[in-house]
């Protein structure tokens, strides 16, 4: 800020000397201005508060996981942004923004191994845009925003960078399942929905729904639901893959042929095995599933191109 040197030089003559001129001289450093005192109605001196400048210290793009009493570590997209500013007074300001979880400002934040600060978050909740008190904590790469007055306590964790592939395909995927029995019979089709959940270690779980297959070489089949867990991402395949032969899983299988029930029991996969490959796509997933339950004489291969359904949270 430019400092102004103000000097008042008043040349006062004798009070009774009408010819004497009284003037106010102001030295601004690079120029001097002079005013007749007779023309000045009032002189006041105001203190101008020094302007505080802010400089962007660091900014981050990331994704969110959110917890409340209703859900835990739920993935909420990868459009969040976090920025840290430093003021000319050496203080730090942190801003947060996300399309769903609002815009927050935290002032006078303590920045070190851990962040610590108080602020206000503006977001839409229950149909209204309101402000909520919030606290900031945790390391800069995974800061935590806590809002005690949202859903009886909401904790938002910001993760720097891109989310694991598991989070991107988490959800429901609907499509036509094309099933071939014994490598040559079929395809038989059924409309199904696979449900995928993500695990913290980057693996996924998939729920295979119950669905019917009519008119197969074995009669009318009903394949029961079961869940394959901890399916890890295989970088070489570019897909999630698991051989679940020895996972101890079982599927209830019913077969009715010419009105006679020929199979109606739980069958495991230890004898002939089962494996699944889940490949992420731009619109959802492709699933290739091969299995042969119990002592069933034919193996089954199911192929499905699923489209991820809208999240109705």
Image (cartoon, rainbow, N blue to C red):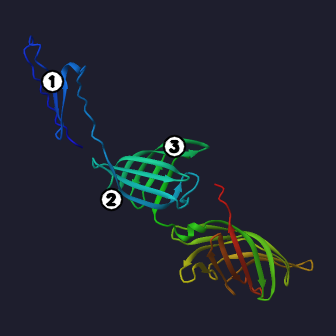
Residue 295 seen: yes
The numbered dot on residue 149 is 3
Q: Classify residue 97 as left or right of residue 254.
A: left
- The front one of 235 and 40 is 40
Query: Are dots 1 and 3 in contact, CB under 8 Å?
Result: no
Q: CA distance from mark 2 to mark 1?
A: 61 Å
Residue 198 seen: no
Helix or strand or loop: what does disc 1 sit on? strand
Helix or strand or loop: what does disc 3 sit on? loop
- The front one of 36 and 134 is 36
Q: Classify residue 53 as left or right of residue 178.
A: left
Residue that lies at the very extreme toward the front in this rendered image = 19
| x then y, percent, for residue 267 | 73, 79
- Residue sitting at x 23%, y 20%: 39
Q: CA distance from mark 1 to mark 3?
A: 64 Å
Nearer-N-terminus badge (2/1): 1
The numbered dot on residue 23 is 1
The numbered dot on residue 113 is 2
Q: CA distance from mark 2 to mark 3?
A: 27 Å
Quadrant of the rendered image containing residue 166: bottom right
Depth-wise, is mark 2 or mark 1 nearer the camera? 1
Position of the N terminus, as image quadrant, is top left
Residue that lies at the very extreme toward the top in this rendered image = 16
- Residue sitting at x 64%, y 83%: 245
| x then y, percent, for residue 278 | 63, 76
- Residue sitting at x 70%, y 83%: 290
Query: Few, some or many C-alpha atoms within 10 Å of disc 3 (few <14, some 14-19, many ≥20)?
Result: few
């Amino acid at each position: 800020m430019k400092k102004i040197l103000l000097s008042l030089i008043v040349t006062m003559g004798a009070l009774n000397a009408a010819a004497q001129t009284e003037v106010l001289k102001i030295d601004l450093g690079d120029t001097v201005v002079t005013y007749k005192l007779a023309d000045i109605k009032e002189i006041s001196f105001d203190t101008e508060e020094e302007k505080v400048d802010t400089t962007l210290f660091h900014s981050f793009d990331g994704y969110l996981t959110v917890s409340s009493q209703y859900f835990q570590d739920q993935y909420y997209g990868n459009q969040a942004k976090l920025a840290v500013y430093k003021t000319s007074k050496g203080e730090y300001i942190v801003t947060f923004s996300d399309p769903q979880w609002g815009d927050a400002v935290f002032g006078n934040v303590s920045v070190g191994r851990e962040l610590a600060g108080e602020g206000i978050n503006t977001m839409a909740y229950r149909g209204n845009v309101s402000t909520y008190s919030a606290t900031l904590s945790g390391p800069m790469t995974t800061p935590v925003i806590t809002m005690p007055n949202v859903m009886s306590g909401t904790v938002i964790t910001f993760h720097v960078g891109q989310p694991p592939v598991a989070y991107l395909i988490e959800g429901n995927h609907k499509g036509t399942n094309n099933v071939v029995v014994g490598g040559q019979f079929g395809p038989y089709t059924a409309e199904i929905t696979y449900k995928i959940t993500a695990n913290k270690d980057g693996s996924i779980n998939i729920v295979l729904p119950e669905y019917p297959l009519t008119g197969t070489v074995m009669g009318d089949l009903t394949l029961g639901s079961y869940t394959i867990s901890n399916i890890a991402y295989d970088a070489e395949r570019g897909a999630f893959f698991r051989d679940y032969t020895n996972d101890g899983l079982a599927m209830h299988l019913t077969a009715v042929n010419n009105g006679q029930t020929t199979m109606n029991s739980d069958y495991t996969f230890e004898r002939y095995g089962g494996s699944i490959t889940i490949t992420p796509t731009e619109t959802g997933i492709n699933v290739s599933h091969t299995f042969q339950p119990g002592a069933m004489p034919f193996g089954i291969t199911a192929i499905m191109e699923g489209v991820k359904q809208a999240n109705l949270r």
